[in-house]
Amino acid sequence: MSGTTAWLIRGAKVLAEDGWDDGAVLAVVAGRIAYRGDLRALPRRLEVAGTEVGRQSLEEIQAEGGYLCPGFVDIHVHGGGGADVMDASPGALRQIARTHARHGTVALLATTVSAPYEHVRRVMEAVQETSDGLDEGSEILGVHLEGPHLSPRRAGAQNPEYLTPPDPRELEALMERFPGLLAMVTLAPELDGASELIELLHRSGVVPAVGHSDATYEQAVEAFQHGAQHAVHTFNGMNPLHHRAPGVPGAVITTRPVTAELIADGFHVHPGVARLLWQVKGPDRLVLVTDAMRATDLPDGRYELGGLEVEVHAGAARLAGSETLAGSTLTLERAVRWMANEVGVPLADAVRLASQNPARRLGLGDRLGSLEVGKDGSVVLLDGELRVRLTLHQGWVLYDGQGSEYDEAEAERSQDALGDGPAAAGGLGAEPEAEPSASVLARMEHEEEL
Ligand SMILES: [Zn+2]
């Protein structure tokens, strides 16, 4: 299978508005979804955007069970497959896009780390050059600037050397030079001048997001009122939730419209806290992200992130010689699986957290995030164990289960064998995939359903 053609996908449960549709088929014609429903009601001719195709010329994909889902959208990706957005080259961006497409991601935001604006401009030039002709990787929707206007107190793995106070002139110049390319900016709202920056971004159609912040509850609520409606990797890179000082997490949890990112890898947030966020944000406001760095889909070892050395051990990336998590090696495939198996989120909802919610956050819900007729033919097929078997974007096969450079199942086995990493010692280690019922939380969810 390769290239774009007209497809008929059958034999899987298909995600519909009200849950899994067991007997449905999905037809993709001219890059769009042309039909979803009962095979017997499939029209003889399908027409989309001026292209008409007879049902005989649809190429069939037999799913043999599994789940057909809208393609995943990742609004927070730094790298993968050995490449980093900060490499600022079309080759690196293509490698990142290919890597994440193998795990079901059809579209992503190339995400920077704190750096001088001159470096950021080079990244944006590379993204602009790469924008077309990405027929074998995830679509790059735009750029997410994570920094450099962040709190030095909550820098995490952001290089403190590059953190600077808010500068509206730099951002205005970027937006002028690269129209439509800037999609999101993460900043700390307690910094002087941050409010003006939030308003500027909001006016310009760019999502201002709160992250790497030490703001008080009140400061964070004020930022949300000024138009920042999104929280970056909630609980990570921010002050903790304290009952007398609820800080940024308290404001994220209690401000209803705010969408909250979660790095669902079992290292960044305890499953119980993931469950808390799921319960308060619900199926419409929680957004799964990877925060993936260069080492994603590569073996453990030493890597670089924003000029700092990172050590990857048992799949967890930390600043060398410290306990500070430095991005992740997560994919949305694993994030969805973790939410379903370890947090007890119904699979249909776990999928929406990685597709519909991020697409809506970017204002792209009219073409991505759900399997409705007329939307992009962008789908991911998961097998019974929730592993990606096929990724299709606008009718192009990005991944068909072949030629993966890295065996994720093998990596997870060796991760289990290592077992005694710092995260596992704290009870946060990934449970073996083969025994999802071993999770206390998943069991709790099951009992509630009974
Ligand atoms: Zn990040």
Image (cartoon, rainbow, N blue to C red):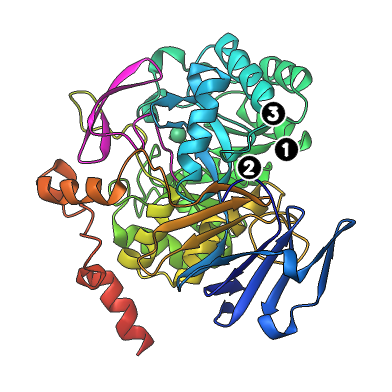
Q: Which residues fall within the magenta stretch?
A: 290-318
Q: Is mark 1 within 8 Å of ligand 1?
A: no
Q: Which residue is mark 1?
A: 202
- The residues tagged by marks 1 and 3 sit, at their Cα atoms, a distance apart of 10 Å
Residue 57 is one of the magenta-drawn residues:
no
Q: Is residue 46 visible?
A: yes
Q: Amino acid at mark 3?
A: Glu
Q: Which mark is residue 251?
A: none
Q: Amino acid at mark 2?
A: Ala
Q: The residue tagged with tag 1: helix, strand or loop?
A: helix
Number of residues whose C-alpha sits closer than 10 Å to that of mark 2, classed few (under 14), some (14–19) or many (20 or more):
many
Q: List x then y, in percent, for residue 14.
A: 57, 73
Q: List x then y, in percent, for residue 266.
A: 29, 52
Label located before the other in sequence (1 or 2): 1
User: Vertically, is 8 above or below 334?
Assistant: below
Number of residues whose C-alpha sits closer than 10 Å to that of mark 1, classed few (under 14), some (14–19) or many (20 or more):
some
Q: Which residue is mark 3?
A: 196
Q: List x then y, in percent, for residue 156.
A: 35, 30
User: Vertically, is 189 above or below 6?
Assistant: above
Disc 1 + disc 2, Cβ < 8 Å: yes
Please tell me which residue lies in front, 409 or 160. 409
Please state, as top left, top right, bottom left or bottom right, where the C terminus lies in the image. bottom left
- The residues tagged by marks 1 and 2 sit, at their Cα atoms, a distance apart of 7 Å
Label located before the other in sequence (2 or 3): 3
